[in-house]
Amino acid sequence: MTYAARRLLLAVPLLFGMSLLIFGLMRLVPGDPAVVVLGFKATPEGVKALREAFHLDEPVVAQYLRWLAGVVRGDFGLDFRQNEPIGRMILDRLPVTIELTLLASLTAAVVGVPLGLLGGGRRGGAADRAALAVGLVGVSIPDFWLGIMLILGLSLWAGLFPSAGFVPLGEAPLENLLSLALPALTLAVSRAAVLGRLTRAAVLDVVHRPFVQYARAKGLGEGAILFRHVLPNAAIPVVTVLGLQIGYMLGGAIVVEMIFTLPGVGRMTLDAVLERNYPVVQSTVLVIGAMFMFVNLITDLLYGAIDPRVRRQ
Amino acid sequence: MSERGTGLTRRQWLVGATAGSVMSLSSARRPAHAQAQPKRGGILRVATVDKPVNMDPGYAQLYSSLQVYQNVFNKMVYVDEAGSFVPGLAKAWKQETDKTWLFDLVDNAVFHNGEPMTSSDVVFTFNRLMDSKNKLPMRVFFSPVQGVEAVGKYQVRFHMDRPFGPFLAMLSQATEIVNEKALKEKDPKLFPIGTGPYRFAEWMKDDHVTLERWDKYFRPGKPYLDKLVFYAPADDTVRLTGLQTGRYHWIQTVPPQRIPELERARDMKASAGKPYFPFYLMLNSSRAPLADKRLRQAIAWAIDRTEIVKLVYYGSHTVTAEPAPEGPWATGVNAHKGGPDLAKAKQLLADAGMSHGLNLTYMVKSQVPVLVKTGEILREQLKRVGIALEVQPLESGQYFEGLVGKKFDIAGAWWSVTVDPDMFYYPMQHSSSGWNFSGFKSEEADKRLDAFRFTTSQAARKKMYPELVRWFQEEGSLVIFSNEIQRYWMKPNVNGSVPLPSLELRFEDTWIG
């Protein structure tokens, strides 16, 4: 508990640093938000009025302090486009991204880890070669291409899944799963390949250790050896990478959200960046950063659950 | 419009009796419905190009928002496929004097919050729009409107400070009637409440907006659909695949190179195509070198419009040199007919002392790849007369900053308002306009534009218009090279959807067979 509390406390200065960084970076990007919002309707008078309304005419430090004071109170401010509370915008989109992330991670883990176990357990065998080939192909396929291919194959030709859009879980659970199936699969393939290769390498590292040979000498079956003795000892790097993958996906699988028109955090962040919607970008990045830290903390705590030696340390 | 067809003077009723107007409206639309009797019911899933951001018509911020809320609200006047003005919430109107217009309103329209629509709503709408404190961007379009007065419960009078030629066109563009009580009840940016054929039901941000049939709509029997759901996939291919898989029933814009193939497809059909969207080059006349008219002319003579349209836009654009090549404002005028004329272009360059060559930049929004490609073709075309063009694709913010700051030589652009050409030329070329991005300033231009805007006789305006087009073509600060053909793609059983000069997506008459 002390460890977790210490990590949570450490997150405060990290988030503060992150807020400074993202605030500063956004100001360095060329393009005036008032001009972007007005587009072809941008007249000098209109731009001036909008800059005043957005407080962009204030010194940068004052803008930062105004925003930070709001964040501390739990008020992320209003977005430039439609004056909508940013907190609500993020909360509306987070469930989509979280669900997509969980589905993709689950699929990746369910496919990738056994693939790696199989390959690592029987190095050089047919299963290992097949797992290596599948892993190589999976890692090499870019998400945008795979997404389009899945739409063409499973949606357009086979008619099994919708090609785009999102149905909330609470509205229609089955349709929700169907609407997320292809995006989750798109994300899962490359991640499963990475997990598979990593698991294989970790298993190879463990499989020749004396306790494995002892288990084998004891007469245990290969399956039991792999799952009961090899996997827990090879799991640490796998869990680390899985945690990182979840963190990245929570930040928004932008390409996949665009291809499948999912109303998630990634798409919102990309639009906000293009629109120079400063408060949305700042707040979203901060929330994503906080989630990333949280996922990493969970991952670290999981080490202790998986390996008693870590717990004792 | 009725002036032209019937010979009525401008002091007479422009539309005449309601019955007559409605008849002319229905007959104008008959071809789209002639094959079968409209059916009631069904859900139409529509995929547009961009997502809506603000449902308050006072802001009219983005076309993507307008497309949705124009089905929730009604305007007083509409424009039909032929470009004629037809009744909306105003069933008839007349111009009483040069500076006053009288409108008769329908007496059976009801807002979606249950409030009956009366003249006080029209007065409120315009007072809200015209009040500078509200800072509503559409105000600028109605600057000649002095005030609106409720004459009776269903009659309003508009007072102008000057005769205002494009008044009806302006009304048909941006004046959705709102209700004061509704605006106070809920945030109009998020919860639009109008008298339109569909009432707002749900807005799932970045995914869809659902509208439902308004059963108390003032036109009996309309609309036909139970529900209308707007989606906005960001990519042409995603939209098209969605139509093919049945996810969407109606989509806007397909990849231009696939049009010939899609025209043969059996699982979809296309509406008629109408060139309602001018694409053009802005030549910065506010600074050297293009402040020199001869250089602008040289560029206009060097450009091969046909080649640009063929190589970049395939069949999705029409070659033209004017903003409205079809409809009541088409002129056929082209000051550079017979172009490209490279000899003439070279001569003009030599006259301007640039025979040794000229370096120019072409600024374009990188998110509009067709205009980037246009720049690449342009670069090759201008090379033939000794002009070196550097194509500069810029991200949205930088592009618009460049426009406002006039930091470019040539910029690729488009404009969407063409019901009355005043809406194109006046904002873009009048010296007093904030939208005059090409920085063109000329007393003669202002004189011509003022005359065109502040003349109320449509016949007189029509007469002066071709000369206006030619004059601006010769000045060359705007070089129109094509006009995007508006065409909608839909499932074969979707009927009653046609492109309108106002570019509205009006689903009041749409039905599923």
Image: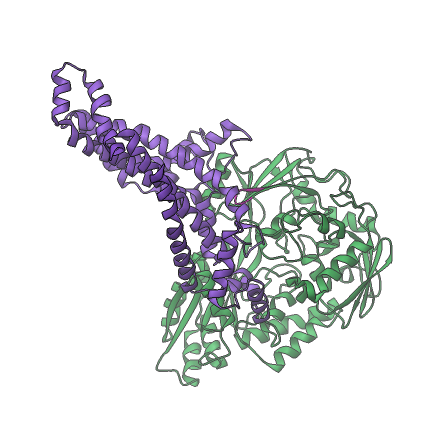
Residue extent of the magenta highlight: B205-209
Query: In screen coordinates, is A207 left or right of B369?
Result: left
Q: Picture coordinates of residue A11 (x, y %)?
A: 38, 48
From the viewer's perspective, is residue B287 above or below residue B277?
A: below
Chain letter for green, please: B
Q: Residue at x 72, y 64 (%)?
A: B130
Q: Picture coordinates of residue B146 (x, y %)?
A: 77, 68
Mark yes or no: residue A152 visible: no
Mark yes or no: residue B168 visible: yes
Query: In screen coordinates, is A130 left or right of B146?
Result: left
Q: Picture coordinates of residue B471 (x, y %)?
A: 59, 76
Task: Determine the colour of chain A.
Answer: purple
Query: How many labels, in total?
Result: 0
Asked whether B24 or A6 is in front, the reply is A6
Task: Tell me if residue B360 is in the magenta stretch.
Answer: no
Q: Quadrant of residue B173?
A: bottom right
